[in-house]
Image (spheres, rainbow, N blue to C red):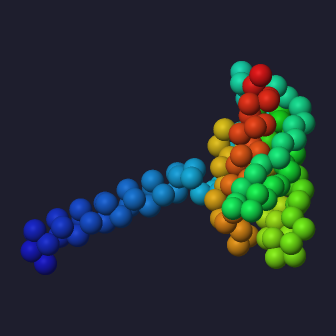
Amino acid sequence: MSGRSRGAVRASLAGISAAAALAACSTDAPDTARDTESPASRTNSAYADGEYTARGWYGGLPSSIEVTVTLDDGVITDAEVAPQATDPTSRDFQERFAAAVPDLVEGRPIDEVRLDRVAGSSGTPNGFNEAIARIKDEASG
């Protein structure tokens, strides 16, 4: 292999390694690794501790989902989603979404929580994200 070819291979491998490292650090994915720092070690949260409930709306036929979270120093320590749909298909999506949410958000700072498609549901996360925004407003006020 020529010197130029080896250099090109090294450059390609370096680029792949850098891309893999950046992907591993991404916080955009809803199921990324959780922050391992304990809530007790955090300080100066912008949010008051407590339990908060809000309803988030989404979709063309206004659908909603109720979200309750407990905050401790800005970290979600408990999360519950209450399905509101009456249509059987929508109810199924909301129930599967509700079952998946605690594993995705508990132990994470509320400022890092934003969900996309979860458990096959693409609309329900919009209502969840709206409810989280309302909770953040209430907890910071």
Using residue 27 as the reference point, say whether residue 10 is left or right of it.
left
Q: Quadrant of residue 72?
A: top right
| x 45%, y 53%: residue | 22
Identify the image quadrant of the C terminus.
top right
Q: In terms of depth relative to the viewer, which is nearer, 64 or 17? A: 64
The answer to whether any part of residue 41 appears in the image is: no
Using residue 8 as the reference point, say whether residue 19 is left or right of it.
right
Q: Residue 21 location, x and y as percent?
A: 45, 56
Q: Is residue 91 above or below residue 57?
A: below
Residue lying at the far front in this picture: please name it: 61
Using residue 5 as the reference point, say whether residue 103 is left or right of it.
right
| x 87%, y 37%: residue | 52
Question: How many numbered marks, from 0 up?
Answer: 0
| x 76%, y 57%: residue | 62
Q: Is residue 54 above or below residue 24?
A: above
| x 23%, y 70%: residue | 9
Q: Quadrant of residue 30?
A: bottom right
Q: In terms of depth relative to the viewer, which is nearer, 17 or 121? A: 121
Q: Is residue 33 above or below residue 117?
A: above
Q: Residue 71 location, x and y as percent?
A: 83, 36
